[in-house]
Amino acid sequence: ANIQVDESETPNPNAHKFTCSVTVIEKGSASFNTKEEAASHPLGKHIWPIGGVKGIFAVKDFVTVTKTDEASWADLSRSIPDAIRRGIVERNG
């Protein structure tokens, strides 16, 4: 799937916003703060296992990922866009 994912910083240094070229969540929003919550949704299921993730919030065309203090954006930024794409593709089945 040719889905564009653009990363941007937020006022919170532990949270980055990933804006997608397609709709991520059709109605309402999705929020995951534990591995168990994340496992029940295609987006969460692909993003959480990367490690260093503390929270995921998705609405309309973007996903905000909050990392743990120990995790590094240099590492996460390489993996999260692909994880988001896989989650969108799986959801759209």
Image (cartoon, rainbow, N blue to C red):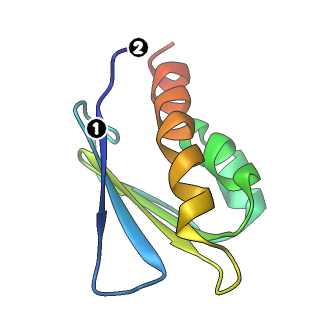
Q: Name the foreground residue: 90 vs 10.
A: 10
Above or below, comparing residue 4 to residue 48 in the picture: above
Which residue is disc 1 drawn over? 26
Identify the amino acid type marked 2.
Ala
- Which label number is shown at residue 1? 2
**Residue depicted at 22% across the width and 32% down the height:** 21
Residue 87's disc is none
Marks counted in the figure total 2
Q: How crowded is mark 1: few (under 14 residues within 10 Å), some or many (20 or more)?
A: few
Task: Examine the rendered structure and indicate whether residue 56 appears above or below residue 45.
Answer: below
What is the x, y in percent for residue 55? 57, 70
* Left/right of residue 61 with respect to residue 49 in the rendered view: left
**Residue 11 place in picture, x, y as percent:** 28, 86
Position of residue 54 relative to residue 56, above or below, is below
Residue plotted at (54% across, 32% down): 87
**CA gap, disc 2 and disc 1:** 18 Å
